[in-house]
Amino acid sequence: MKKATFIILCLEGAVLSFNVAATAALVPSIASDFALSQFVVGRVIWLYMIPYGLAALLYGPLVRLLDARKVELFCIFSFASANLVGGLSQNIATLFAARFMMGIFGASVIPLGLILIARSLGQLRRGRYIGIFFGSTFVASLLGLFLSGIINWRLIFIIPAVCGFILWVFMYLYLPSFKKDTGNFRLGYLAAFRNKRVIKIFGYIFLISLIYHAVQQWLGVYFSTQLKLGQFFISMLITLTSLSGIFGEVWGGRLADAIGRIKVVNLGIILMMLCVFMLLIKLPLGLLVLSMVIWGSGWAFNHVGLSTMLADLPQELLNEAASLNSGVRFIAGGLGVSLGGLIMSKSFVLGFLVFGIGLLFLLLLSRLVTNKTIGG
């Protein structure tokens, strides 16, 4: 893989991720601006995630038929346009529609990145490159979260719109054609799901993504309604999950190459579980800071370990696996946000207890199932 191509892939991931996490932190501000309930405005989260997950299922197979360069040029331009509409929206319906379109067109970025990295690099080097790739998305997410605490919420959508249009120019000039890799359009999901290894990996990914987003996307509301924190402190606390995630993705990728994918996945689960059980009590600010660092690091270790496992799957399953990675994560995440909202609206303590037990179940499941079916 050429250095310029990898840089472009990382920049695409950065533009995509700038406001994904920040949107959760901005729910209180958007609700105040439109004079709506925070739980109503919270729909902006899953209205992005579920369309993203469904659309992602098409992009892996689609780049067998069409040049991935053309697909990405179209999608990045459309994604930037949707962000611009969201930033200029004057009512919640327009913002909901913009978020829906962001999900549809943004879903192309991660599958393409995983496909190209897996095709271009050997198994012993994939983990570190995947870690850097996802690390760039966490850097952008961190920046978006930080800025969400000090600038108007509309700019959190306008900034990636402007950056997306600028990136499109550089993509047009420097992103190479992948036409030689194209062939016939083929949906290989039935063949993929005949592989028990694939089913168990994605069953696990579905459950961990559901639990993660059920907690992560309501942290802003928890900090606002239960701890009475202002927007700045809300954004800074959630920013820590991305800051720790940057190091978690990069070092987790290296660890995945050095000690094995499964050990990194399990370490991530243990850290996430520790954080959720800490949140069962109202922590002082210092311990809240620590809990967010633990949470972000745990998710990043788990994420990069699982993503590297997918890159190790046979080449004939690669396109479907890359699409399923994004599709399953975001569909499950959207369902998790919805489920989390239902439970958290009744009791945050109940929610943290339920999802903490769910993480404990996954830790046991990963030891009983993952080790036997995926290997080290």
Image (cartoon, helix red, strand yellow):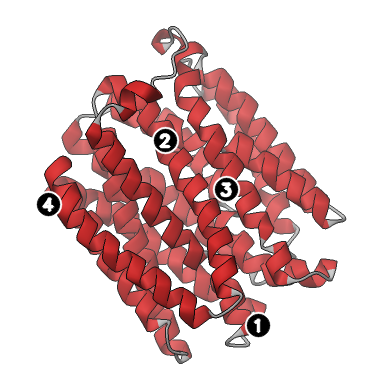
Residue sitting nearer the eye, 160 or 50: 50
Q: What element carries label 4?
A: helix
User: Residue placed at 42% from the left, 54% from the top?
Assistant: 209
Q: How far apart are marks 2 and 4 (CA)?
A: 25 Å
Q: Where is residue 127 in the image (x, y as percent from the top left)?
A: 25, 42
Quarter of the image containing the N terminus? top left
Q: Which mark is residue 259?
A: 4
Q: How far apart are marks 4 and 3 (CA)?
A: 32 Å
Q: Distance between the residues labelled 2 and 1?
A: 38 Å
Q: What element carries label 3?
A: helix
Q: Which mark is residue 275?
A: none
Residue sitting nearer the eye, 167 or 61: 61
- Seen in the picture, residue 238 relative to 302 is either above or below; the reply is below
Residue labelled with disc 1:
230
Of the residues shown, which amino acid type is indicated by label 2?
Leu
- Seen in the picture, residue 290 relative to 188 is either above or below; the reply is below
Q: Which of marks 2 and 4 is in front?
A: 2
Q: Which mark is residue 49?
A: 3
Of the residues shown, which amino acid type is indicated by label 4?
Ile
Q: Distance between the residues labelled 3 and 2?
A: 14 Å
- Seen in the picture, residue 219 relative to 145 is either above or below; the reply is below
Q: How far apart are marks 3 and 1 (CA)?
A: 26 Å
Q: Which of marks 4 and 3 is nearer the N terminus?
A: 3
Total marks shown come to 4
Q: Are marks 2 and 4 in contact (CB under 8 Å)?
A: no
Q: Where is residue 240 in the image (x, y as percent from the top left)?
A: 46, 70
Q: Which of marks 2 and 1 is nearer the N terminus?
A: 1
